[in-house]
């Protein structure tokens, strides 16, 4: 679909001897006399893939940032439909429906950038532990990196599609840059572990953790919340309350905690009913994937909020990033309202407050939308998009691009005289007969 320099294939080996010195044996070794030294733990098999998955959260954020840059800049250039007869056509970025396509993706791009920083930092800490033989946090890192790679890549995939659609017909053009960006970014959902398979791995880790405190084992910091006493009701009583970041983090924590516990119970009930492990697991896929998704969503929101709380920045910058963080969190609640209504954690009235605040935030973010994509600092050469050019000269450059096409080097392409003209002439003669 993309990555046009190569295509996918596979190779299969049968009875092939691989010389000892050609083995990719970072963690296990074979001596010249044939003695095999296994890795310090079988969990080391995660290690190679973990680093790639950790980095792929940043890669996904990068592609989503590119998509936002193109769509937001183009939405400022493109004008459409007079609001009042005879009046000026507005920039399409001023339509609320357009802002609803653009700004949640912009907020997600920032959320994934901050999540990627944090996961990379955690990876470096755990690597340092592994180097001195401590592998106690490897499973936590595996659960986190598998889930966040899957979560961020799927969100990027959908996000790019929404952004492409937001550019109308020109979004479909090669000149938009979307075909290339989407073609590469969509691979992230599959490579280094396909979405559902990874979400199920994260879910397996989470349901195991839910069972652990019964055995007295302490849970790692990132999932310790699973066993805390949950708030039973969202305390928001006014629209201002739903703008409280702590309250929003609690709502996401509640959702994740409930869904992970529900999945663990469903799995347990299946096993108690006498189903073998593999069947019980298969019959719980839906709730397990939902649980892993809720955990990753909670992680992303919590991390965004922590970033704001722990990073020094000017007040104007803090205000702008706080609006984005609020939009990311509130829009996610809007989209997953059913999960919060299902157990009565939030009421219909509270969800309406959330919806109203999503709408209010769109207008706030509009003021800084262009600066927020300029801040990604993606040079035109790398963006590869006429719609998303920094200087905004879209139409002149689209014309230039079309003029430079090999098809447009002569007024009439030679294929017309060679092929089409005789064919048309023939059909014309036949019609006459
Ligand atoms: C661009 C690209 C580059 C790649 N580069 C490399 C590379 O350099 N080296 C390399 O080794 N590989 C590479 N791959 C392969 C990649 O790792 C695999 O394609 C990926 O892990 C998915 O495996 P699969 O293709 O076998 O999919 P499948 O396993 O056939 O998945 C197909 C469907 O089955 C579902 N499914 C499969 N198993 C389960 C399960 N247990 N439970 C529930 N659902 C399941 C999946 O969710 C999916 O919907 C690359 C792939 C791509 C697209």
Image (cartoon, helix red, strand yellow):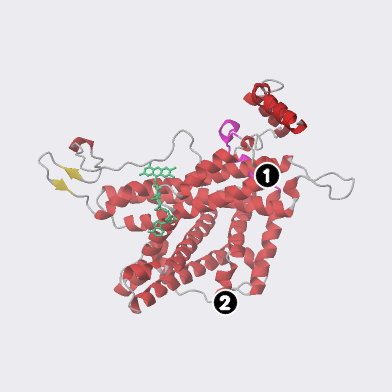
Q: Disc 1 marks which residue? A: 167
Is residue 234 visible in the rendered image? The answer is no
Screen quadrant of the C terminus:
top right
In which quarter of the view is residue 345 placed? bottom right
Residue 58's x, y, as percent? 48, 45
The stretch drawn in magenta includes residue 18: no
Is residue 130 visible in the rendered image? The answer is yes
Residue 103's x, y, as percent? 64, 51
**At x 64% / y 68%, what residue is drawn?**
241
* 236 or 333: nearer the viewer: 333
User: Mark 1 vs mark 2: which is more N-terminal?
Assistant: 1
Secondary element at image label 1: loop
Q: Disc 2 marks which residue? A: 344
Left/right placement of residue 339 relative to residue 208 reads right
Q: What residue span does the magenta drawing correspond to?
A: 367-384
Calculate the distance from the C-alpha at mark 1 to the C-alpha at mark 2.
Answer: 39 Å
Secondary element at image label 2: loop
| 10 Å crowding of disc 2: few (<14), some (14-19), many (20+) | few
**At x 51% / y 46%, what residue is drawn?**
186
In which quarter of the view is residue 372 placed? top right
Is 49 drawn above or below residue 422 in the view shown? below
Q: Which mark is residue 221?
A: none
The stretch drawn in magenta includes residue 383: yes
Is 404 drawn above or below residue 201 in the view shown? above
Query: In the displayed image of the protein, which residue is found farthest to the bottom?
Result: 273
Q: Is mark 2 within 8 Å of ligand 1?
A: no
**At x 45% / y 46%, what residue is drawn?**
56
In which quarter of the view is residue 223 placed? bottom left
């Amino acid at each position: 679909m993309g990555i046009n320099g190569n295509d996918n294939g596979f190779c299969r080996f049968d009875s092939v001897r691989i010389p000892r010195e050609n083995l990719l044996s970072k963690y296990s070794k074979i001596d010249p006399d044939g003695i095999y030294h296994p890795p310090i733990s079988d969990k080391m098999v995660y290690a190679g893939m973990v680093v790639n998955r950790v980095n792929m959260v940043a890669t996904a954020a990068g592609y989503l940032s590119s998509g936002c840059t193109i769509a937001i800049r183009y939405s400022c250039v493109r004008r459409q439909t007079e609001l009042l007869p005879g009046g000026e056509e507005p920039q399409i970025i001023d339509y609320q429906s357009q802002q609803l396509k653009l700004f949640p993706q912009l907020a997600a791009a920032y959320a994934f950038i901050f999540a990627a920083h944090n996961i990379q930092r955690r990876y470096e800490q755990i690597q340092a532990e592994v180097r001195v033989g401590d592998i106690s946090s490897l499973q936590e890192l595996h659960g986190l990196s598998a889930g966040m790679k899957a979560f961020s890549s799927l969100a990027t995939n959908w996000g790019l599609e929404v952004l492409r659609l937001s550019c109308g017909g020109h979004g479909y053009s090669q000149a938009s840059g979307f075909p290339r960006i989407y073609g590469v970014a969509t691979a992230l959902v599959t490579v280094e572990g396909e979405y559902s398979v990874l979400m199920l791995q994260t879910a397996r880790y989470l349901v195991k953790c839910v069972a652990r405190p019964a055995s007295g084992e302490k849970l790692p910091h990132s999932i310790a919340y699973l066993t805390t006493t949950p708030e039973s009701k969202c305390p928001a009583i006014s629209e201002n309350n739903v703008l409280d970041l702590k309250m929003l983090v609690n709502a996401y924590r509640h959702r994740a905690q409930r869904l992970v516990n529900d999945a663990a119970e469903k799995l347990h009930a299946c096993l108690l009913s006498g189903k073998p492990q593999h069947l019980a697991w298969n019959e719980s896929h839906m709730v397990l994937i939902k649980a892993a998704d809720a955990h990753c969503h909670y992680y992303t929101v919590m991390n965004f909020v922590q970033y704001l709380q722990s990073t020094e920045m000017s007040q104007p910058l803090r205000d702008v990033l706080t609006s984005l963080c609020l939009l990311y969190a509130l829009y996610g609640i809007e989209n997953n309202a059913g999960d919060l209504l299902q157990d009565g954690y939030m009421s219909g009235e509270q969800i309406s407050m959330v919806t109203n605040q999503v709408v209010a935030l769109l207008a706030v973010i509009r003021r800084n939308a262009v600066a927020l994509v300029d801040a990604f600092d993606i040079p035109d050469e790398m963006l590869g998009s006429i719609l998303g050019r920094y200087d905004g000269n879209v139409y002149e450059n689209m014309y230039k691009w079309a003029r430079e096409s090999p098809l447009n080097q002569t007024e009439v392409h030679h294929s017309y005289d060679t092929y089409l003209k005789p064919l048309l002439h023939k059909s014309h003669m036949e019609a006459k007969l």
